[in-house]
Image: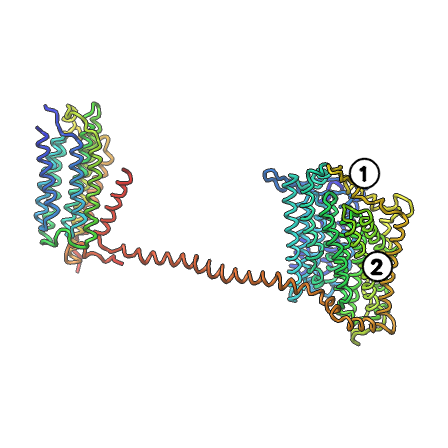
C-alpha cells in the first residue's frame, strides 16, 4: 500500500523537479519547486520522519521559497534565456557529468541489499519532535548552537550585502 | 721524545700558522725570522732527540698511532707515525738541510717586503710540516697527505712572485703535472686496500713477503701505480716537465724542494715498497728503464743550457733518474744513499748559484758571468766541492753513492737479474755515459761562472761581492757534508772488510726477506751480489772515475783558458740541428702543448660553449622557464570568469572522485 | 501498523535521479534564480539520501540512535540551506544592481 504512495510521491517529485529546471519562466520554476517540496515531505512522512516532513514544508516551502518569490518580484525578473543555451561544451559536459554522478549513485543503490521488512515500533517512535528535540539539545548541542551562529551570520551578511549604496 | 713523534712536524706547522698571522699583521722581519727559522730549528733538535733514543733501543720499527682517522666499514686508517731505519734516515737529512736552507733564506729574501717575507717563511714551514708528515707516516694515506701537502707548497712557493705571470704559470704547471702522478698514488692506495685490507706499512709488506705467490699480481699492480706517483713527484719521463719551469721560484725554494727533499719523495716511496718491486720483475724493470733513460736524457739537455738554474734543474732530474735506476736494479739502500748525498751537494749547488745570482743582481745567464771566484771565494770553494761530489770524484760524497748504483747495475746485468740481463747491461752503460755528461756539464758551469774573465756589464762588475754570513754559513756546512757525507756508506766490502758500510747495515731491516715462491724464484736470483768478483768491482770503480775525469777534462778544454768557447761554438755550428734540439729540450713542452694541452683546452671550450651554454643553459634552464611560461599562457584560458564553467569544473571533480572511489 | 514496504534503496535511487536533475539545472541554466532553485533540488536530494539511510538503520533493533542522527543531520542541512539562500539572494540583488541583469554569464570580470 504505502509503496504505491511512495511511487506516486516519487513520480511527482521527479516531474516537478524537471519542471523546476527546464522552463524559462522563473515563477514556473519556483512554484514547481514548491510542489516538489511537498512531494519530498510526503516521502519523509512515509519513512516515518514526521517532524522532518513538517519542518520541510514550514521552512523550505514556507520560508525559503517565499524569500525567493519576493526576490523575483523585487527584481522584476522575466524569462531570461532558454534551457541549455550558452556554450555548447558547457551544455554537453554538464549533461554528461550530471548523468554520470547520478548514474554512479544509482549503481551503488542497485548494489546495496535492501533490508527486508519495514517499519518497526522504533521508527515510529523516533520520527517525532520529542526524540529529535532531545537529541538536538543533548548529543548534538554544539552543532545546534553553531547553527544558531550561522544563521545570525547569514542575517548580518544578507543585511549588509543588500544595503542600498549611498549615491 | 719517542712517544711524541708528532711534535716534530707540528712545530713546523705552528711556525707556518704563526707566520701567516704575522704576515697579515706586518710584523718586522726579525720576529718572522725567529718564528720561521726557530721552528725548524726546534723541529730538528726534536727529531735528533727522537733519533738518539731510537738508536739506543733494540726495536727496529716503532709505530705510534694517534687517533682513528678513517673508519668506514672494513677500512680502518689510523693517523700514526712510524720510525724505522728508512724514515730515520729521511728525517735526519730533511730536517738538517731544511734548517740550513731556512737560515740561508734570511739573507737571500732580505729585500722582500715584510708581508712577502712572512709569507715565504710560512709556506716554507708548511712545506717542512708536509715533508715530515710524508716521511714519518706509517701508512699510505698519511703519507699521501704529506705527498699532497708538499705538492701544494711547491705550487705556492714556485708562484711566490705571483705578480709575474710566468711564475704563476710555472706554479700551476708543477701542481697539475704532479696531480697526474698523484692519481697513480691514489689508485695504489685503493688497490692496497682491496688486496690487503689495510694500508699500514707494518702490515702490508710483511704480508706480501710471506706469501709472494698470493700477492704476485698485487705487487706488480701496486708497484707500478706507486711508481706512476713517483714519476710525477720526482720528475721522471714523461712527467719531468714541471721541474725546469719550477726554477721561477726563489733559489732557496729550488734548493729545498726541487733538489733535496720533495723530489726525493718518489724515491722514498719506491724504497719503502721495495718488497713489491722485488716480488715483481716487471715493475722493477720499468723503474730501472724509466730511471736510466731519464738520467741520460736530462743530462743531454743540461749540456747546452745557459741559465745556471736550468742546468741544475736538469741535473736534478738526471740524478733522480740514477736513484730510480738504483732501485730498479735492486739497490734500494744505494738509492737512498744517493738521495742523502744528492741532498747535500745539490742543495749546496743551488744555494751557491743563489749566491752568484744575488751578486750579479738577479742575472742568471752564465754567458754574462765569469771570473767570479775572485769576488766570491767562499761560494767558489763550496760550489767546487759540491761539483766534485756530483761528478763522482773519489772521497767526495757523490762518488760512493753513484758508484754503488752503477756497480749494482752492472751486477744486475752480469747476474741476469730476473732474466733481463741484457737490458740491465744497457742501463749500466747509459748510466756510465750519463756520469760522463754530468761531470762535463757541471764543470762547464764552474768554468763559465767562476773562471776566466767577467763577461757581464761594467756596472754589475762593480757590485760583485760575497754573500753575507747567513748565506755563506749554510754553504760551508753543506760543502763540508758534500766532502765527508760519502763515508756514511763506505764500501767496506771492496777492502774485504764488512761493517764499514754504515748506511747499508743500518737500513738492512727495511729490506724484508721474501719467502720462496712456488716457481722457485727465490731471493737468490734477485740478489746477484756474488755474480761479480772483487776484481771486477775494482775495475768498475776505476772505469767510473776515469769517465768522470774525462768529462772534467773535456769541459776544461772547452771552457777554460784562452781557447774558451771556441771549440763549443764550432761544434754548435757544425751540429746545428743537434744543438738546437738540446737547447730547446727536445721540444717536449711544445709537443705536450700540441698533443695534450691544446686538445684539453679545446675540449674545455667545447664544454663551455656547447654543453654549458647551448645545451644546459638554453635547452634546460631557459627551456624550463619557457615551458612554464607557455603552460601559463595556455592555462589562462581556463579562467573564463564564467561562474558556470567553474561550477562545471567542480562537478567534474566530484564525478571523478566518485568514479575513482567506486 | 503494516510493514512499510519501501526498500531504502528505492529512496536512494530517487535521490540519485533528483541529484542529477539538480546538477543539470545548475550547470546548464543562465538565470541566477533558476540556478539557485536547482541548487535547492540538489540539497533536497542529499537530504533524501540521509533519510534513506536513517530509515535503513532504524529498521534494525537497537539502532534508533542512528535514525536520530540522520534526522538531526537533515535538520541541520535545512538550516544551512536557509542561511545560504538568504545570503545568496542578497548577492543576486547586488548583481542585479551592478550588472543590470542576473544572467550569470554576464558576471565575468575575472576573465583573463
Q: Check the image and name the residue furthest to the bottom.
A: B458
Residue B332 visible from this viewpoint: no
Task: In the rendered structure, find residue B391 and report the number of the disc placed on it.
Answer: 2
Q: Nearer the viewer, residue A157 or C62?
A: C62
Q: Quadrant of the C terminus of chain C?
A: bottom left
Q: How is the image coloured?
A: rainbow
Q: Measure how far apart labels 1 and 2 are at the Cα level.
A: 38 Å
Residue B281, image x and y in percent? Answer: 73, 46
Under circle 1, the secondary element is: loop
Crowd around label 2: few <14 · some 14–19 · many ≥20 (10 Å): many
Q: Quadrant of residue B592?
A: bottom right
Callout count: 2
Under circle 2, the secondary element is: helix
Q: Nearer the viewer, residue B557 or C14?
A: B557
Q: Mark 1 vs mark 2: tell me if same chain.
A: yes
Q: Which residue is mark 1?
A: B57
Amino acid at each position: 500500500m504505502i509503496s504505491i504512495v511512495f511511487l506516486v510521491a516519487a513520480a511527482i517529485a521527479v516531474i516537478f523537479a524537471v519542471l523546476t529546471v527546464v522552463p524559462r519562466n522563473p515563477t514556473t520554476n519556483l512554484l514547481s519547486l514548491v510542489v516538489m517540496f511537498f512531494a519530498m515531505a510526503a516521502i519523509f512522512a512515509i519513512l516515518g520522519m514526521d517532524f522532518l516532513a513538517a519542518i520541510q514544508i514550514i521552512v523550505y516551502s514556507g520560508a525559503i521559497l517565499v524569500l525567493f518569490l519576493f526576490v523575483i518580484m523585487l527584481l522584476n525578473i522575466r524569462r531570461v534565456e532558454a534551457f541549455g543555451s550558452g556554450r555548447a561544451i558547457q551544455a554537453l559536459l554538464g549533461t554528461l557529468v550530471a548523468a554520470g554522478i547520478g548514474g554512479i549513485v544509482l549503481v551503488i543503490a542497485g548494489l546495496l541489499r535492501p533490508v527486508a521488512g519495514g517499519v518497526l515500533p522504533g521508527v515510529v517512535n523516533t520520527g517525532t519532535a520529542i526524540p529529535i528535540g532531545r537529541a538536538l539539545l543533548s548529543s548534538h548541542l554544539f552543532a545546534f548552537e553553531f547553527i544558531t551562529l550561522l544563521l545570525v551570520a547569514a542575517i548580518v551578511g544578507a543585511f549588509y550585502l543588500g544595503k542600498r549604496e549611498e549615491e | 721524545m719517542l712517544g711524541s713523534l708528532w711534535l716534530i712536524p707540528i712545530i713546523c706547522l705552528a711556525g707556518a700558522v704563526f707566520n701567516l698571522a704575522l704576515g697579515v699583521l706586518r710584523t718586522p722581519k726579525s720576529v718572522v725570522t725567529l718564528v720561521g727559522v726557530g721552528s725548524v730549528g726546534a723541529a730538528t733538535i726534536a727529531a735528533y732527540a727522537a733519533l738518539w733514543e731510537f738508536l739506543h733501543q733494540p726495536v727496529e720499527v716503532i709505530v705510534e698511532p694517534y687517533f682513528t682517522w678513517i673508519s668506514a666499514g672494513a677500512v680502518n686508517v689510523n693517523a700514526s707515525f712510524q720510525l724505522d731505519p728508512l724514515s730515520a734516515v729521511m728525517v735526519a737529512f730533511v730536517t738538517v738541510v731544511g734548517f740550513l736552507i731556512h737560515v740561508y733564506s734570511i739573507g737571500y729574501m732580505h729585500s722582500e717586503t715584510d708581508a712577502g717575507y712572512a709569507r715565504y717563511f710560512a709556506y716554507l714551514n708548511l712545506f717542512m710540516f708536509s715533508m715530515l708528515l710524508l716521511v714519518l707516516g706509517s701508512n699510505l694515506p698519511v703519507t699521501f697527505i704529506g705527498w699532497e701537502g708538499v705538492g701544494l707548497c711547491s705550487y705556492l712557493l714556485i708562484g711566490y712572485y705571483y705578480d709575474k705571470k710566468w711564475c704563476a704559470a710555472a706554479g700551476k704547471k708543477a701542481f697539475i703535472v704532479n696531480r697526474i702522478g698523484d692519481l697513480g698514488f691514489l689508485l695504489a692506495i685503493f688497490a692496497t686496500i682491496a688486496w690487503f685490507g689495510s694500508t699500514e706499512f707494518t702490515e702490508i709488506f710483511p704480508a706480501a713477503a710471506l706469501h709472494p705467490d698470493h700477492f704476485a699480481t698485487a705487487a706488480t699492480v701496486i708497484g707500478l701505480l706507486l711508481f706512476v706517483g713517483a714519476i710525477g713527484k720526482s720528475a721522471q719521463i714523461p712527467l719531468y716537465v714541471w721541474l725546469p719551469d719550477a726554477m721561477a721560484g726563489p733559489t732557496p725554494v729550488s734548493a729545498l724542494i726541487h733538489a733535496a727533499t720533495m723530489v726525493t719523495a718518489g724515491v722514498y716511496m719506491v724504497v719503502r715498497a721495495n718488497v713489491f718491486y722485488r716480488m715483481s720483475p716487471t715493475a722493477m724493470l720499468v723503474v730501472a728503464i724509466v730511471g736510466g733513460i731519464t738520467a741520460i736524457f736530462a743530462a743531454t739537455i743540461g749540456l747546452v743550457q745557459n741559465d745556471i738554474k736550468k742546468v741544475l734543474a736538469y741535473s736534478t732530474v738526471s740524478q733522480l733518474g740514477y736513484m730510480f735506476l738504483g732501485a730498479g736494479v735492486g739497490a734500494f739502500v744505494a738509492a737512498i744513499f744517493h738521495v742523502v748525498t744528492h741532498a747535500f751537494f745539490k742543495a749546496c749547488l743551488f744555494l751557491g748559484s743563489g749566491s752568484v745570482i744575488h751578486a750579479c743582481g738577479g742575472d742568471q745567464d752564465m754567458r754574462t758571468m765569469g771570473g767570479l771566484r775572485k769576488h766570491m771565494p767562499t761560494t767558489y770553494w763550496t760550489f767546487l766541492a759540491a761539483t766534485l761530489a756530483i761528478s763522482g770524484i773519489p772521497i767526495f760524497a757523490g762518488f760512493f753513492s753513484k758508484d754503488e748504483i752503477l756497480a749494482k747495475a752492472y751486477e744486475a746485468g752480469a747476474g741476469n737479474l730476473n732474466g733481463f740481463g741484457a737490458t740491465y747491461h744497457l742501463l749500466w752503460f747509459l748510466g756510465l755515459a750519463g756520469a760522463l755528461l754530468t761531470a762535463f756539464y757541471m764543470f762547464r758551469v764552474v768554468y763559465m761562472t767562476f773562471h776566466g774573465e767577467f763577461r757581464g756589464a761594467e756596472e754589475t762588475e762593480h757590485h760583485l761581492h760575497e754573500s753575507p754570513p747567513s748565506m755563506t754559513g749554510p754553504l760551508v756546512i753543506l760543502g763540508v757534508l758534500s766532502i765527508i757525507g760519502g763515508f756514511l756508506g763506505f764500501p767496506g766490502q771492496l777492502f774485504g772488510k764488512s761493517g764499514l758500510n754504515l748506511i747499508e747495515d743500518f737500513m738492512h731491516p727495511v729490506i724484508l726477506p721474501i719467502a720462496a715462491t712456488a716457481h722457485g724464484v727465490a731471493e737468490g736470483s734477485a740478489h746477484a751480489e756474488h755474480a761479480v768478483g772483487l776484481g771486477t768491482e775494482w775495475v768498475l770503480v776505476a772505469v767510473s772515475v776515469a769517465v768522470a775525469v774525462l768529462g772534467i777534462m773535456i769541459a776544461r778544454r772547452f771552457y777554460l783558458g784562452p781557447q774558451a768557447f771556441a771549440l763549443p761554438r764550432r761544434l754548435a755550428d757544425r751540429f746545428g740541428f743537434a744543438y738546437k734540439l738540446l737547447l730547446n729540450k727536445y721540444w717536449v713542452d711544445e709537443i705536450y702543448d700540441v698533443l695534450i694541452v691544446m686538445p684539453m683546452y679545446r675540449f674545455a671550450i667545447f664544454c663551455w660553449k656547447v654543453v654549458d651554454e647551448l645545451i644546459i643553459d638554453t635547452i634546460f634552464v631557459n627551456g624550463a622557464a619557457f615551458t612554464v611560461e607557455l603552460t601559463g599562457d595556455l592555462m589562462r584560458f581556463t579562467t573564463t570568469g564564467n561562474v558556470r564553467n567553474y561550477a562545471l569544473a567542480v562537478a567534474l571533480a566530484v564525478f571523478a572522485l566518485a568514479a575513482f572511489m567506486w | 501498523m503494516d510493514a512499510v514496504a519501501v526498500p531504502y534503496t528505492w529512496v536512494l535511487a530517487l535521490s540519485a535521479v533528483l541529484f542529477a536533475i539538480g546538477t543539470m539545472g545548475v550547470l546548464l541554466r543562465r538565470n541566477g534564480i533558476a540556478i539557485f532553485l536547482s541548487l535547492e533540488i540538489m540539497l533536497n536530494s542529499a537530504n533524501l539520501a540521509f533519510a534513506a539511510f536513517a530509515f535503513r538503520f532504524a529498521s534494525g533493533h537497537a539502532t534508533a540512535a542512528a535514525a536520530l542522527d540522520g534526522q538531526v543531520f537533515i535538520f541541520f542541512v535545512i538550516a544551512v540551506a536557509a542561511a545560504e539562500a538568504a545570503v545568496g539572494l542578497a548577492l543576486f540583488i547586488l548583481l542585479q544592481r551592478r550588472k543590470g541583469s542576473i544572467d550569470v554569464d554576464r558576471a565575468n570580470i575575472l576573465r583573463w
